[in-house]
Image (cartoon, rainbow, N blue to C red):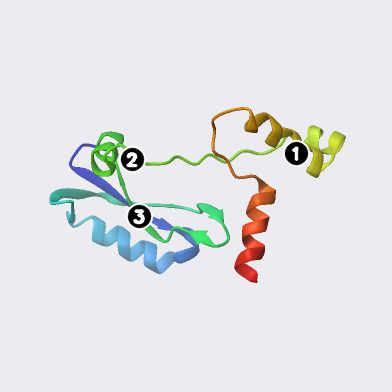
């Protein structure tokens, strides 16, 4: 993306063929949006994916900007999230709980902030209660 461009994102869970078609047609009409008093031209294509951090947090719509513009808009104050999985053979060998425990012990020795599957489950139980 150029510095004056943004892309429209639509989560698949919040869309269907009619919505996507309508948005794609609209995006071909040189639409612009204003963010922090700066005008951004929307590119002429809708971007879609199924991004889910957990079942309680889903992205319906978002604007995507270049890395440079993102840093300017956030003032450099942002957090990145990465998703990781355990290797199947390790889980088969040690079991799921021991594998998670082992990885948590390794991560505890670093300065990384992380949330494990078990912590996520705990939050889900809290939401349920």
With 80 as the anchor, is 34 left or right in this view? left
Does residue 34 lie above or below 107 as drawn?
A: below
Q: Residue at the location (33% across, 40% down)? A: 77
Tell which tag, 3 or 1, sits nearer the viewer: 1
Say what secondary structure mark 1 lies in.
helix
Say what secondary structure mark 3 lies in.
strand
Q: CA distance from mark 2 to mark 3?
A: 18 Å
Q: CA distance from mark 3 to mark 1?
A: 35 Å
First-in-chain label (3 vs 1): 3
Say which quarter of the image contains residue 66. top left
First-in-chain label (2 vs 3): 3
Q: Residue at the location (68% across, 36% down)? A: 104
> Which of these two is toward me, 107 or 80?
107
Q: Which mark is residue 101?
A: 1
With 90 as the anchor, is 4 left or right in this view? left
Q: Residue at the location (65% across, 45% down)? A: 116
Q: CA distance from mark 2 to mark 1?
A: 31 Å
Assess disc 1: are there few (<14), some (14-19) or many (≥20) residues with their C-alpha within 10 Å of its C-alpha: few
Assess disc 2: are there few (<14), some (14-19) or many (≥20) residues with their C-alpha within 10 Å of its C-alpha: few
Question: Residue 80: x, y in percent?
Answer: 45, 39
Q: Are marks 3 and 1 in contact (CB under 8 Å)?
A: no
Question: Residue 39: x, y in percent?
Answer: 14, 50
Q: Which mark is residue 62?
A: 3
Question: Residue 48: x, y in percent?
Answer: 43, 53
With 87 as the anchor, is 59 left or right in this view? left
Assess disc 3: are there few (<14), some (14-19) or many (≥20) residues with their C-alpha within 10 Å of its C-alpha: few
First-in-chain label (2 vs 1): 2
Q: Are marks 2 and 1 in contact (CB under 8 Å)?
A: no
> Which of these two is toward me, 17 or 2?
2
With 26 as the anchor, is 118 left or right in this view? right
Residue under pointer 2: 77
Q: Are marks 2 and 3 in contact (CB under 8 Å)?
A: no
């Amino acid at each position: 993306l150029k510095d004056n461009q943004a892309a429209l994102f639509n989560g698949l869970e919040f869309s269907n063929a009619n919505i996507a078609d309508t948005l794609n047609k609209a995006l071909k009409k040189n639409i612009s949006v204003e963010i922090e008093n700066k005008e951004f031209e929307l590119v002429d294509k809708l971007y879609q994916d199924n991004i889910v951090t957990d079942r309680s947090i889903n992205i319906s719509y978002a604007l995507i900007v270049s890395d440079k513009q993102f840093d300017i808009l956030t003032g450099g104050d942002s957090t990145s999230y990465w998703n990781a999985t355990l290797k199947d053979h390790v889980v088969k060998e040690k079991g799921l709980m021991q594998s998670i425990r082992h990885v948590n012990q390794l991560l505890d020795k670093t300065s990384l902030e992380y949330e494990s599957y078990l912590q996520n489950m705990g939050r889900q139980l809290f939401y349920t209660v």
